[in-house]
Image: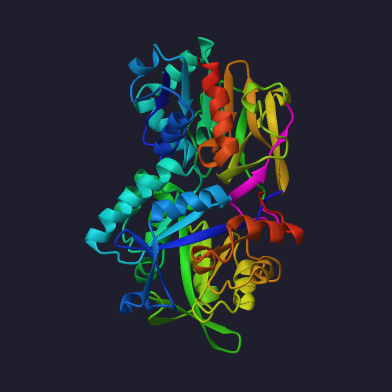
Amino acid sequence: MMAKRVIPCLDVHDGKVTRGVQFGRAEAGELRNVGDPVELALRYNEQGADEMVFFDITASAHGRATMVNVIERAADQCFMPLTVGGGIKSVEDMYTMLRAGADKISINSSALARPELIREGAQKFGSQCIVVSIDAKKTGPDQWVVFSHGGRKPTGLDAIEWARRAVSLGAGEIVLNSIDADGTKAGFDLVITRRISESVGVPVVASGGAGTLGHMADVLLEGKADAVLAASIFHFGEYTVGEVKRFLADRNIPVRL
Amino acid sequence: MIALLDYGSGNLRSVHKALLKVGANVRIVQHPDGMRDARAVVLPGVGAFDDCINALRKQELLEASREFIKSGRPFLGICVGYQALFEKSEEFNSCAAGLAILPGKVVRFSERSGLKIPQIGWNQLEIVRPDCPLYRGVANGSYVYFVHSFFPKPADEAIVATRTEYGETFASSVWRDNVFATQFHPEKSQKVGLQLLSNFVALAS
C-alpha cells in the first residue's frame, strides 16, 4: 500500500536553516537560526523522513550558489527524494538544481507570473519533477485566494482553480500552504486541503500549521492529503519524524516505518 | 568496475553516489568504449521513454547495451532504464522502439477515481522471487520510492521479481538471468535501496 509521507522542510537563508515566526516575516529579519541544512537533513534522514524540501528564502544570486552546494552535499549523503524551491524562474534554473541532486522542483511565484513555466518544466523533465506550491489565504466563506511573493501579494486567483490549472499545465504535485495557519501551530486548514485534494488527480502535500501529532493525522484523514510538510515541529525538537510516523501508524494511517 | 551510463538522465548523480556509498568502483560512461571492460552496467533513467531511447541511440549506447547483456554480465535498469528493456511504450506520442531484450510493452496506470497519477512516493514490494539475488536481506513488504506514470507489462510472468499494488498490481521489478530492472528508485529508497544496490554490486565482484 502507498504510504503517506512525512516531509521536513528546511528554509535556507544564506546557507543556514532559519525559521520565521509567521509568513513573510523571514524577509523582515525575524528569523531564528536553526542550524546547518546538511546536518539537519542527515538527522531527518536517520529519523526516517520520506522526503525533504529545501526552500531558498534568499533567492539572490549569492544565495543560489550556496543552495546548489547545499543540495549537492545533502544529495551525496541522503538517499531519499529531495525537493528544491525558492526563486526558480526558468528551465535552466530547474536543470541546475536537478543536476545538483534534486529530484523535484517546487515553483510558486514564478509559475503565477508565467504559468507556461509549468508546462516547459514538465515537458523537459516530466510532470513528476514539477511541484507547484500554492500559498492560499481564506478571504471569505468557502473562498481561498492565492498569494504570491511569500504570501505578501494577493493575486485574485481562486486557489482551487489555480491548482486545477497548474495540474492541467503539467504539475505532478501540489503543495498547499495555508497562510492563515502557517507558523501558528494551530492545525492545518483541513477544508481547503480536502477541496484541492478532491479537485486534482495528483498528490497534495499539506503545509502550514502543524503543531501537534493530531494535526498531522487530521490533515491526512479529513484533509485527504497525501503527505504532510512541517518545519518548526521538527527543527525545535518537539517531535522526531519517527515519533510522528509511529503516531500515524497507531491511527491506521499507512506510513513507512 | 561498474559502468554507469550517462546519457543526460536526471538521476545520474544520485545513482552514482549511491553506488559509491555501497563500495562500488564506478565509471561514468558516455560511449560504448567505456563498457567493454566493465563487470556490470547500470542504466539509470528519469523522464520520457522516447528521450531515453533516442539519447542512448545517439551515443551508440543502445546497441552496446544489447551486446553487453548478451555477454552475460550483470545489468541493472532503473525506472525508464527498466522500461527501455521492453519492446515499446504507450507513452504519449511514443514511436521509439525499446531494446526489446524483454518481451512486453510499457503501459500507463489506468485512470480511475481516487488514483493519483503519477505515483509519487513510497510503496511496498511483494517479493515473488525471493531467490532473486537483488533481494537478499530485503524483507517482503519493504517500502521503496516510486515516481512514474508508466510501467512495463512483461509478456513473460516468470520474470517478475516483485509486484506492487497501485490501483492495480504491476511488475515493480524483473529478473531474467543477468538482467535486473526496477521501476522504483533504489538510489532514493534509503536503507532498502542501498541494500539492493549492494547486492547488485556483489554480483559484479
Identity of the residue drawn at 39% across and 37% down: B13
Q: Position of residue A238 (x, y in %)?
A: 57, 66
Q: Looking at this view, is A44 or A237 the one in front?
A: A237
Q: In the figure, B106 relative to A170: above or below?
A: above
Q: Number of callouts in the render?
A: 0
Identity of the residue drawn at 46% across and 63% down: A132
Q: Is residue B47 left or right of residue A247?
A: left
Q: Is residue A188 magenta?
A: no
Q: Is residue A21 left or right of residue A248?
A: left
Q: In the figure, B141 relative to A211: above or below?
A: above
The answer, for residue B49, to whether it is visible in the render is: yes
The answer, for residue B84, to whether it is visible in the render is: no
Q: Position of residue B114 (x, y in %)?
A: 69, 59
Q: Looking at this view, is A49 or A40 the one in front?
A: A40
Q: Is residue B118 magenta?
A: yes
Q: Position of residue B63 (x, y in %)?
A: 43, 18
Identity of the residue drawn at 37% across and 70% down: A109
Classify residue A207 by image quadrant: bottom right
Q: Which residues are magenta?
A: B111-129
Q: In the figure, A175 relative to A95: above or below?
A: below
Residue farthest to the left, as pictured: A62
Identity of the residue drawn at 50% across and 76% down: A182
Q: Position of residue A167 (x, y in %)?
A: 52, 62
Q: In the figure, A227 relative to A3: above or below?
A: below
Classify residue B87 by image quadrant: top right
Residue farthest to the top, as pictured: B71
Residue farthest to the front, as pictured: A237
- Colour treatment of the image: rainbow
